[in-house]
Amino acid sequence: MSRENYFTEERVLDLTLRPKSWENYVGQEKIKNNLKIIIEAAKQRKESIEHLLFYGGSGLGKTTLAHLVAKEIKKETKTTSGPAIEKPGDLAAILTNLEPGSILFIDEIHRLNRITEEYLYPAMESFKLNLILGRGPMAKIMEMNLPFFTLIGATTQPALLSSPLRARFGASFGLDFYQIFEIEKILERSTKILNVETEGESLKIIAKASRFTPRVANNLLKRVRDFAQVKGKGTITPNITKEALLALEIDELGLTSQDRKILEIIIKKFNGGPVGLQALAAATMENENSILDIYEPYLMRLGFIERNPKGRIATKLAFQHLKTNSQKLFDFLNLEFR
Ligand SMILES: Nc1ncnc2c1ncn2[C@@H]1O[C@H](COP(=O)(O)OP(=O)(O)O)[C@@H](O)[C@H]1O
Ligand SMILES: [Mg+2]
């Protein structure tokens, strides 16, 4: 399957399984409670809610949260993303067309370019837009009033946001990895929506391989369902689940062949590290953003990778995991390991 089709399928899955109510949004309790208070207080004051920033790894539920907030406000929501807003004019077109009190959701907000970003500051702060008309010495600045709006930004890389932008959000919320029991709960709901039967520990096995991430869990569930349909009688059993994970080359900790390749290369090629991001991306032929957004956070969470100012280091735990999980890696055994 092409990468493109995969992502389209993923998007459709996101939409069907995306919780549409707070009750179905599992976990992240502190964030949910704080958001409800912010929303309630703003409602009482009949004001728009302050600008919100959601940050955290891919698939942890940032977009879903933004939609839940929007639903609560019962106002129009416009959705766009950092890379889609190429120039200040694009931003101006969006901002001047907002309904008063509505929500503007900017996904991947760290990818806004700096020039556009500077137009966003006065818009967020005082709902004004300073348009520059003409060029050179004849240029004039025209100040336009904008409708009140709430900006919700989402990012996987909060460190890449400039500090003036970060400072203009009234509240920021970091989404963390989920607990296994929370992922199981999410999966249970998904099996009902997808109308699939499960037996025994199946969902627990999937949850353990889900990288503590709802989107990954749902994607795995769907793959296992396909397997159950083709190789079994449609019911997801623990054996079918294990067989499917094996076929997908996903181990019981949810490591994919890409994760293992990253670890192998740090160990084998860079003698355990430290290795810088660029060198690691080149050696593994992975995109730097995928390493930062998808692989590294989970490998760090497992304690398989550590980071220091010089780069990434593979830990003893990583070595042990690879050793017990793959016969092919036995040739590493005679490597001196720290
Ligand atoms: N807290 C949650 N409870 C239930 N399902 C969730 C939760 N967070 C995410 N999901 C599921 O994971 C999918 C991806 O979430 P999304 O909000 O798009 O993540 P992000 O925007 O952080 O990449 C959603 O469609 C939904 O099915
Ligand atoms: Mg998203």
Image (tube, helix red, strand yellow):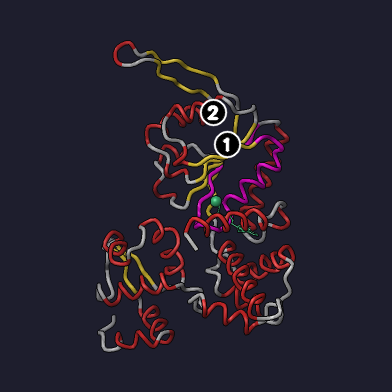
Start-end of magenta stretch: 48-76
The numbered disc on residue 331 is: none
How many neighbours does mark 2 have within 10 angstroms: few (below 14), some (14-19), or many (20 or more)?
many
Please count the marks in the image. Answer: 2
Mark 2–mark 1 contact, CB under 8 Å?
yes
Q: Which residue is mark 1?
A: 104
Q: What secondary structure is found at the residue carrying circle 2?
A: helix
Relative to residue 322, is residue 3 depicted above or below?
above
Instruction: Examine the rendered structure and indicate whether residue 290 appears above or below residue 262.
Output: above
- Where residue 169 appears, x then y in whole percent? 52, 39
Q: Amino acid at mark 2?
A: Leu
Lateral position of residue 307 relative to residue 233, left or right: left
Q: Secondary structure at mark 1?
A: strand
Q: Position of residue 255 (x, y in %)?
A: 47, 73
The image quarter in which residue 110 lies: top left
> Residue 233: x, y in percent?
71, 80
Q: Quadrant of residue 198?
A: bottom right
Front in this rendered view, residue 63 or 72: 63
Q: Residues within 10 Å of mark 1 (few under 14, many from 20)?
A: many
